Image (tube, rainbow, N blue to C red):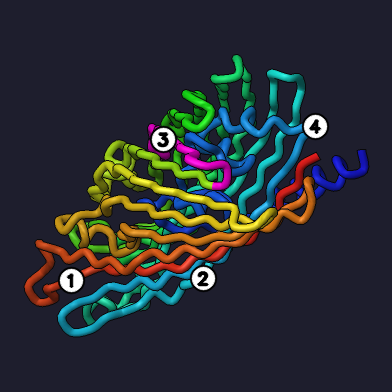
Amino acid sequence: MKRSTIALTSLMLVLASSSMALATNGDNTLGLTALQWARGGAVVAAPVDIPSMMYNPAAAGEFKVDKGGFDMSLGLLNAVRSIDTKTKSTESDSDNYLAMGVGAVARASDKMFFGLAAGGVAGLGVDIPGGALSPAAPTAIVTTKSLFKIAPTMAYVVNDKLTLGVSPQIGYQTLAMRTPQFVLPQTGVFGLGGAVGAVYHITPTIQAGLSYTSKMYMQEYSFNGSAVGVVNGAPAQIEGKYTMEMDVPQSVAGGVSFRPMPKLLLEADLKWIDFSDVMDRAELKGPTGNVIPILFGWKDQVVYSLGAEYEVLPGLTVRSGYNYGASPIGPEDVTSNYGSIAVIEHHLSLGITKQWSPAVSTSASYTHGFTNKVTSNNAPAALAPVSIEATQNIAYAQLSFRF
Protein backbone atom coordinates (compact mmCIF):
# COMPACT_ATOMS: atom_id res chain seq x y z
CA MET A 1 0.00 0.00 0.00
CA LYS A 2 2.84 2.35 0.86
CA ARG A 3 4.51 1.68 -2.48
CA SER A 4 1.26 2.30 -4.33
CA THR A 5 0.81 5.62 -2.53
CA ILE A 6 4.34 6.73 -3.41
CA ALA A 7 3.80 5.78 -7.05
CA LEU A 8 0.49 7.63 -7.26
CA THR A 9 1.93 10.72 -5.56
CA SER A 10 4.89 10.79 -7.93
CA LEU A 11 2.60 10.48 -10.91
CA MET A 12 0.40 13.34 -9.74
CA LEU A 13 3.43 15.58 -9.21
CA VAL A 14 4.64 14.97 -12.76
CA LEU A 15 1.19 15.52 -14.21
CA ALA A 16 1.00 18.84 -12.39
CA SER A 17 4.12 20.01 -14.23
CA SER A 18 3.92 21.63 -17.61
CA SER A 19 6.04 20.46 -20.53
CA MET A 20 7.02 21.65 -23.97
CA ALA A 21 7.45 19.25 -26.84
CA LEU A 22 9.27 20.13 -30.03
CA ALA A 23 8.60 18.95 -33.56
CA THR A 24 10.13 15.73 -34.90
CA ASN A 25 7.64 13.97 -37.22
CA GLY A 26 6.04 17.19 -38.40
CA ASP A 27 5.03 18.65 -35.03
CA ASN A 28 4.62 15.18 -33.41
CA THR A 29 7.23 13.71 -31.08
CA LEU A 30 8.58 10.18 -31.62
CA GLY A 31 7.35 9.18 -28.17
CA LEU A 32 6.79 10.13 -24.54
CA THR A 33 9.65 8.30 -22.84
CA ALA A 34 13.30 7.27 -23.05
CA LEU A 35 12.33 3.72 -24.02
CA GLN A 36 10.03 4.88 -26.83
CA TRP A 37 12.63 7.27 -28.24
CA ALA A 38 15.31 4.56 -28.01
CA ARG A 39 13.16 2.38 -30.28
CA GLY A 40 12.67 5.20 -32.79
CA GLY A 41 8.98 5.29 -31.96
CA ALA A 42 8.42 1.65 -32.97
CA VAL A 43 6.11 0.56 -30.12
CA VAL A 44 2.76 -0.35 -31.72
CA ALA A 45 3.28 -4.12 -32.06
CA ALA A 46 5.47 -4.78 -28.99
CA PRO A 47 4.83 -1.99 -26.46
CA VAL A 48 8.05 -1.10 -24.68
CA ASP A 49 6.58 0.53 -21.55
CA ILE A 50 3.30 1.49 -19.92
CA PRO A 51 3.00 4.97 -21.58
CA SER A 52 3.03 3.15 -24.95
CA MET A 53 -0.75 3.04 -24.40
CA MET A 54 -0.80 6.61 -25.75
CA TYR A 55 0.01 5.17 -29.19
CA ASN A 56 -1.72 1.79 -28.86
CA PRO A 57 -4.26 1.48 -26.01
CA ALA A 58 -3.87 -2.31 -26.03
CA ALA A 59 -0.43 -1.79 -24.46
CA ALA A 60 -2.13 -1.44 -21.07
CA GLY A 61 -2.90 -5.15 -21.09
CA GLU A 62 0.36 -6.43 -22.52
CA PHE A 63 2.58 -6.23 -19.43
CA LYS A 64 0.58 -8.61 -17.22
CA VAL A 65 1.73 -6.87 -14.04
CA ASP A 66 0.91 -8.53 -10.71
CA LYS A 67 -0.82 -5.44 -9.33
CA GLY A 68 0.32 -2.42 -11.29
CA GLY A 69 3.22 -0.22 -12.29
CA PHE A 70 4.28 3.14 -13.59
CA ASP A 71 6.89 4.84 -15.78
CA MET A 72 8.12 8.42 -15.46
CA SER A 73 10.38 10.05 -18.04
CA LEU A 74 12.00 13.45 -18.47
CA GLY A 75 13.57 14.72 -21.68
CA LEU A 76 15.74 17.61 -22.80
CA LEU A 77 15.36 18.67 -26.42
CA ASN A 78 17.90 20.85 -28.17
CA ALA A 79 16.94 22.23 -31.57
CA VAL A 80 18.87 24.50 -33.88
CA ARG A 81 16.60 26.14 -36.47
CA SER A 82 17.33 28.90 -38.93
CA ILE A 83 16.02 30.97 -41.81
CA ASP A 84 18.61 31.31 -44.58
CA THR A 85 18.62 33.86 -47.40
CA LYS A 86 21.23 34.65 -50.01
CA THR A 87 22.75 37.29 -47.72
CA LYS A 88 22.51 35.82 -44.19
CA SER A 89 21.52 32.95 -41.93
CA THR A 90 19.51 33.75 -38.79
CA GLU A 91 19.11 31.17 -36.01
CA SER A 92 16.24 30.93 -33.56
CA ASP A 93 17.11 32.17 -30.07
CA SER A 94 15.03 29.42 -28.41
CA ASP A 95 17.01 26.17 -28.50
CA ASN A 96 16.24 24.09 -25.39
CA TYR A 97 13.00 22.57 -24.16
CA LEU A 98 11.83 20.18 -21.46
CA ALA A 99 9.45 17.31 -22.14
CA MET A 100 7.74 14.84 -19.81
CA GLY A 101 5.90 11.57 -20.19
CA VAL A 102 4.25 9.36 -17.57
CA GLY A 103 2.04 6.30 -17.43
CA ALA A 104 0.49 4.05 -14.80
CA VAL A 105 -1.49 0.82 -15.04
CA ALA A 106 -3.45 -1.28 -12.54
CA ARG A 107 -4.63 -4.85 -12.89
CA ALA A 108 -8.34 -5.25 -12.17
CA SER A 109 -8.52 -8.93 -13.10
CA ASP A 110 -6.74 -11.52 -15.24
CA LYS A 111 -8.34 -9.94 -18.29
CA MET A 112 -9.02 -6.31 -17.42
CA PHE A 113 -6.43 -3.55 -17.01
CA PHE A 114 -6.88 0.17 -16.42
CA GLY A 115 -4.23 2.78 -17.13
CA LEU A 116 -3.41 6.42 -17.62
CA ALA A 117 -0.77 8.01 -19.85
CA ALA A 118 0.05 11.70 -20.12
CA GLY A 119 2.67 13.99 -21.62
CA GLY A 120 3.67 16.39 -24.35
CA VAL A 121 3.02 14.69 -27.69
CA ALA A 122 3.41 17.56 -30.16
CA GLY A 123 4.75 21.08 -30.48
CA LEU A 124 6.84 23.54 -32.41
CA GLY A 125 8.13 27.08 -32.12
CA VAL A 126 10.83 29.57 -33.03
CA ASP A 127 12.18 32.87 -31.77
CA ILE A 128 13.70 34.49 -34.87
CA PRO A 129 15.02 38.02 -34.27
CA GLY A 130 13.92 40.88 -36.49
CA GLY A 131 15.68 41.45 -39.79
CA ALA A 132 16.03 37.76 -40.63
CA LEU A 133 14.57 38.29 -44.07
CA SER A 134 15.72 41.84 -44.70
CA PRO A 135 16.45 45.09 -42.80
CA ALA A 136 13.11 46.34 -44.10
CA ALA A 137 11.35 43.62 -42.06
CA PRO A 138 12.50 44.34 -38.49
CA THR A 139 9.67 42.47 -36.73
CA ALA A 140 10.69 39.26 -34.95
CA ILE A 141 9.02 35.95 -35.84
CA VAL A 142 8.03 34.23 -32.59
CA THR A 143 5.76 31.19 -32.32
CA THR A 144 5.01 28.55 -29.71
CA LYS A 145 2.66 25.60 -30.05
CA SER A 146 2.42 22.60 -27.72
CA LEU A 147 -0.03 19.78 -27.14
CA PHE A 148 -0.34 17.96 -23.80
CA LYS A 149 -2.46 14.80 -23.84
CA ILE A 150 -4.06 12.75 -21.07
CA ALA A 151 -5.23 9.27 -22.06
CA PRO A 152 -7.25 7.20 -19.55
CA THR A 153 -7.15 3.67 -20.96
CA MET A 154 -8.91 0.33 -20.63
CA ALA A 155 -7.46 -2.89 -22.06
CA TYR A 156 -9.09 -6.31 -22.27
CA VAL A 157 -7.16 -9.53 -22.80
CA VAL A 158 -9.51 -11.55 -24.99
CA ASN A 159 -7.29 -14.65 -24.96
CA ASP A 160 -3.65 -15.66 -25.09
CA LYS A 161 -3.32 -14.18 -28.56
CA LEU A 162 -5.43 -11.00 -28.65
CA THR A 163 -5.50 -7.85 -26.48
CA LEU A 164 -7.82 -4.92 -27.24
CA GLY A 165 -7.69 -1.39 -25.87
CA VAL A 166 -9.68 1.83 -25.93
CA SER A 167 -8.74 5.31 -24.76
CA PRO A 168 -10.67 8.59 -24.66
CA GLN A 169 -8.07 11.35 -24.95
CA ILE A 170 -8.11 14.85 -23.48
CA GLY A 171 -5.82 17.50 -24.94
CA TYR A 172 -4.64 20.94 -23.93
CA GLN A 173 -3.05 22.89 -26.77
CA THR A 174 -1.35 26.27 -26.47
CA LEU A 175 -0.53 28.62 -29.32
CA ALA A 176 1.09 32.03 -29.80
CA MET A 177 2.22 33.71 -33.03
CA ARG A 178 3.99 36.97 -33.77
CA THR A 179 4.78 37.90 -37.37
CA PRO A 180 4.93 41.11 -39.40
CA GLN A 181 1.24 40.50 -40.22
CA PHE A 182 -0.22 39.86 -36.74
CA VAL A 183 0.46 39.52 -33.02
CA LEU A 184 -1.44 36.74 -31.21
CA PRO A 185 -0.45 36.31 -27.53
CA GLN A 186 -0.27 32.81 -26.07
CA THR A 187 -3.53 31.16 -25.17
CA GLY A 188 -4.71 27.60 -24.64
CA VAL A 189 -7.72 25.46 -25.49
CA PHE A 190 -9.01 22.01 -24.55
CA GLY A 191 -9.97 19.25 -26.95
CA LEU A 192 -11.37 15.72 -27.09
CA GLY A 193 -10.51 12.68 -29.16
CA GLY A 194 -9.99 8.96 -28.75
CA ALA A 195 -7.97 5.93 -29.74
CA VAL A 196 -8.50 2.19 -30.19
CA GLY A 197 -5.87 -0.49 -30.63
CA ALA A 198 -5.05 -4.17 -30.72
CA VAL A 199 -2.07 -6.46 -30.27
CA TYR A 200 -2.21 -9.95 -31.80
CA HIS A 201 0.30 -12.70 -31.02
CA ILE A 202 0.60 -14.55 -34.33
CA THR A 203 3.15 -17.04 -32.99
CA PRO A 204 5.21 -17.15 -29.78
CA THR A 205 7.88 -15.06 -31.56
CA ILE A 206 5.82 -12.83 -33.91
CA GLN A 207 3.15 -10.31 -32.99
CA ALA A 208 1.33 -7.48 -34.76
CA GLY A 209 -0.22 -4.23 -33.58
CA LEU A 210 -2.72 -1.80 -35.03
CA SER A 211 -4.05 1.47 -33.65
CA TYR A 212 -6.23 4.36 -34.74
CA THR A 213 -6.17 7.79 -33.10
CA SER A 214 -9.07 10.03 -34.03
CA LYS A 215 -8.95 13.67 -34.91
CA MET A 216 -8.93 15.72 -31.71
CA TYR A 217 -11.48 18.50 -31.90
CA MET A 218 -10.15 21.57 -30.12
CA GLN A 219 -12.03 24.58 -28.84
CA GLU A 220 -11.78 27.75 -30.87
CA TYR A 221 -8.80 29.93 -30.01
CA SER A 222 -9.57 33.47 -28.87
CA PHE A 223 -6.74 36.02 -28.87
CA ASN A 224 -6.70 39.62 -27.67
CA GLY A 225 -4.29 40.60 -30.41
CA SER A 226 -3.72 42.78 -33.42
CA ALA A 227 -3.28 42.39 -37.16
CA VAL A 228 -2.53 44.53 -40.17
CA GLY A 229 -5.72 45.76 -41.85
CA VAL A 230 -7.23 48.69 -43.67
CA VAL A 231 -8.87 51.64 -41.92
CA ASN A 232 -10.31 54.51 -43.98
CA GLY A 233 -8.51 53.19 -47.03
CA ALA A 234 -5.08 53.12 -45.36
CA PRO A 235 -3.04 50.25 -43.82
CA ALA A 236 -3.36 50.16 -40.01
CA GLN A 237 -2.81 47.85 -37.05
CA ILE A 238 -6.24 46.74 -35.86
CA GLU A 239 -6.47 45.57 -32.26
CA GLY A 240 -9.27 43.42 -30.87
CA LYS A 241 -10.44 39.85 -30.49
CA TYR A 242 -9.22 37.36 -33.09
CA THR A 243 -10.40 33.76 -33.33
CA MET A 244 -9.05 30.70 -35.09
CA GLU A 245 -9.62 26.95 -35.18
CA MET A 246 -6.78 24.40 -35.22
CA ASP A 247 -7.56 20.75 -34.51
CA VAL A 248 -5.15 17.83 -33.99
CA PRO A 249 -4.79 15.36 -36.89
CA GLN A 250 -5.99 11.77 -36.90
CA SER A 251 -3.47 8.97 -37.42
CA VAL A 252 -3.30 5.25 -38.17
CA ALA A 253 -0.35 3.06 -37.13
CA GLY A 254 0.52 -0.58 -37.61
CA GLY A 255 3.54 -2.71 -36.89
CA VAL A 256 5.07 -6.18 -36.66
CA SER A 257 7.62 -7.42 -34.13
CA PHE A 258 9.83 -10.51 -34.29
CA ARG A 259 11.86 -12.19 -31.57
CA PRO A 260 14.33 -14.50 -33.38
CA MET A 261 15.96 -15.39 -30.05
CA PRO A 262 14.97 -14.75 -26.42
CA LYS A 263 17.36 -11.83 -25.97
CA LEU A 264 16.67 -10.04 -29.29
CA LEU A 265 13.56 -8.13 -30.42
CA LEU A 266 13.02 -6.39 -33.77
CA GLU A 267 10.06 -4.19 -34.73
CA ALA A 268 8.95 -2.27 -37.82
CA ASP A 269 6.07 0.25 -37.71
CA LEU A 270 4.27 2.35 -40.31
CA LYS A 271 2.22 5.43 -39.40
CA TRP A 272 0.07 7.86 -41.39
CA ILE A 273 -0.61 11.36 -40.00
CA ASP A 274 -3.40 13.40 -41.60
CA PHE A 275 -1.71 16.81 -41.45
CA SER A 276 -3.42 18.12 -44.59
CA ASP A 277 -6.79 18.12 -42.82
CA VAL A 278 -5.76 20.51 -40.03
CA MET A 279 -2.53 22.23 -41.15
CA ASP A 280 -3.19 23.04 -44.80
CA ARG A 281 -5.06 26.28 -44.12
CA ALA A 282 -6.28 28.22 -41.10
CA GLU A 283 -8.55 31.26 -41.01
CA LEU A 284 -7.91 34.06 -38.55
CA LYS A 285 -11.15 36.00 -38.00
CA GLY A 286 -10.78 39.62 -36.91
CA PRO A 287 -12.92 42.05 -34.89
CA THR A 288 -14.17 43.84 -38.00
CA GLY A 289 -15.37 40.61 -39.64
CA ASN A 290 -12.29 40.35 -41.80
CA VAL A 291 -10.76 36.93 -42.43
CA ILE A 292 -7.00 36.49 -42.77
CA PRO A 293 -6.05 33.18 -44.46
CA ILE A 294 -2.95 31.46 -43.06
CA LEU A 295 -1.71 29.05 -45.72
CA PHE A 296 0.58 26.57 -43.93
CA GLY A 297 0.19 24.05 -46.76
CA TRP A 298 1.25 20.97 -44.75
CA LYS A 299 1.01 17.60 -46.51
CA ASP A 300 0.13 14.24 -44.97
CA GLN A 301 3.11 12.35 -43.56
CA VAL A 302 3.97 8.65 -43.64
CA VAL A 303 6.41 7.70 -40.86
CA TYR A 304 8.63 4.61 -40.95
CA SER A 305 10.02 3.38 -37.61
CA LEU A 306 12.50 0.57 -36.97
CA GLY A 307 13.42 -0.55 -33.47
CA ALA A 308 15.70 -3.20 -31.96
CA GLU A 309 16.65 -4.28 -28.46
CA TYR A 310 19.15 -6.84 -27.16
CA GLU A 311 19.91 -8.06 -23.65
CA VAL A 312 23.73 -7.99 -23.66
CA LEU A 313 24.01 -9.11 -20.03
CA PRO A 314 21.45 -10.27 -17.46
CA GLY A 315 19.62 -7.10 -16.45
CA LEU A 316 21.31 -4.90 -19.08
CA THR A 317 19.49 -4.16 -22.37
CA VAL A 318 20.57 -1.91 -25.24
CA ARG A 319 18.19 -0.45 -27.79
CA SER A 320 18.43 1.37 -31.09
CA GLY A 321 15.96 2.91 -33.50
CA TYR A 322 15.60 4.66 -36.82
CA ASN A 323 12.72 6.93 -37.77
CA TYR A 324 11.96 8.61 -41.10
CA GLY A 325 9.14 10.86 -42.22
CA ALA A 326 9.28 13.18 -45.24
CA SER A 327 8.86 16.84 -44.30
CA PRO A 328 5.20 17.92 -44.44
CA ILE A 329 6.45 21.34 -45.61
CA GLY A 330 7.38 21.45 -49.28
CA PRO A 331 9.38 24.04 -51.29
CA GLU A 332 6.16 25.80 -52.29
CA ASP A 333 5.24 26.47 -48.65
CA VAL A 334 8.56 27.55 -47.08
CA THR A 335 7.61 31.23 -46.99
CA SER A 336 4.40 30.38 -45.09
CA ASN A 337 6.26 28.42 -42.40
CA TYR A 338 9.00 30.69 -41.04
CA GLY A 339 7.36 30.23 -37.64
CA SER A 340 6.96 26.44 -37.93
CA ILE A 341 10.29 25.00 -39.03
CA ALA A 342 9.21 21.35 -38.69
CA VAL A 343 11.37 19.79 -41.40
CA ILE A 344 13.46 17.08 -39.68
CA GLU A 345 13.20 13.80 -41.62
CA HIS A 346 15.83 11.27 -40.40
CA HIS A 347 16.32 10.27 -36.73
CA LEU A 348 18.76 7.78 -35.19
CA SER A 349 18.39 6.65 -31.56
CA LEU A 350 20.37 4.71 -28.95
CA GLY A 351 19.30 3.65 -25.46
CA ILE A 352 20.22 1.53 -22.47
CA THR A 353 18.21 -0.01 -19.60
CA LYS A 354 19.49 -1.36 -16.28
CA GLN A 355 17.21 -3.69 -14.32
CA TRP A 356 18.14 -3.11 -10.67
CA SER A 357 15.58 -5.51 -9.25
CA PRO A 358 12.41 -7.28 -10.43
CA ALA A 359 10.54 -4.08 -9.51
CA VAL A 360 12.85 -1.22 -10.52
CA SER A 361 14.69 -0.27 -13.71
CA THR A 362 16.19 2.90 -15.14
CA SER A 363 16.71 3.85 -18.76
CA ALA A 364 18.37 6.55 -20.84
CA SER A 365 18.28 7.40 -24.53
CA TYR A 366 19.80 9.77 -27.05
CA THR A 367 18.30 10.69 -30.43
CA HIS A 368 19.83 12.77 -33.19
CA GLY A 369 17.57 14.45 -35.75
CA PHE A 370 19.76 14.95 -38.80
CA THR A 371 20.01 18.38 -40.41
CA ASN A 372 17.46 19.02 -43.11
CA LYS A 373 16.92 22.10 -45.24
CA VAL A 374 13.93 22.92 -47.44
CA THR A 375 14.46 25.68 -50.02
CA SER A 376 11.61 27.82 -51.32
CA ASN A 377 10.73 27.69 -55.01
CA ASN A 378 8.67 30.90 -54.92
CA ALA A 379 10.58 33.33 -52.65
CA PRO A 380 10.99 36.97 -53.75
CA ALA A 381 13.94 37.37 -56.11
CA ALA A 382 15.57 39.90 -53.78
CA LEU A 383 15.90 37.22 -51.07
CA ALA A 384 16.16 33.96 -53.03
CA PRO A 385 17.27 31.39 -52.31
CA VAL A 386 15.36 31.26 -49.02
CA SER A 387 15.47 28.11 -46.87
CA ILE A 388 14.31 26.85 -43.49
CA GLU A 389 16.67 24.45 -41.73
CA ALA A 390 16.66 22.36 -38.54
CA THR A 391 18.82 19.96 -36.50
CA GLN A 392 17.88 18.25 -33.23
CA ASN A 393 19.42 16.40 -30.27
CA ILE A 394 17.14 14.76 -27.71
CA ALA A 395 18.10 13.05 -24.43
CA TYR A 396 15.70 11.24 -22.08
CA ALA A 397 15.93 9.52 -18.68
CA GLN A 398 13.31 7.15 -17.27
CA LEU A 399 12.34 5.40 -14.03
CA SER A 400 10.15 2.28 -14.24
CA PHE A 401 8.48 0.51 -11.34
CA ARG A 402 6.38 -2.68 -11.22
CA PHE A 403 4.58 -4.09 -8.19
Q: CA distance from mark 2 to mark 4?
A: 38 Å
Q: Residue at x 60, y 15 (%)?
A: 158
Q: Residue at x 57, y 42 (%)?
A: 262
Local packing at callout 3 (Cα closer than 10 Å; few below 14, some 14-19, many 20+) is many
The magenta region covers 247-263
Q: Earlier in the sequence, mark 3 or mark 1?
A: 3
Q: Badge 1 is on which residue?
A: 386
Q: Earlier in the sequence, mark 2 or mark 4?
A: 4
Q: Earlier in the sequence, mark 1 or mark 2?
A: 2
Q: Earlier in the sequence, mark 3 or mark 4?
A: 4
Q: Which amino acid does the dot numbered 2 rest on?
A: Asn
Q: CA distance from mark 3 to mark 4?
A: 28 Å
Q: Badge 3 is on which residue?
A: 255
Near-viewer residue (200 or 192): 200
Query: Is 232 left or right of 313, judged from the image as shown?
Result: left
Query: Is 189 left or right of 180, judged from the image as shown?
Result: right
Q: Badge 4 is on which residue?
A: 67
Q: Quadrant of residue 79?
A: bottom left
Q: Which amino acid does the dot numbered 4 rest on?
A: Lys
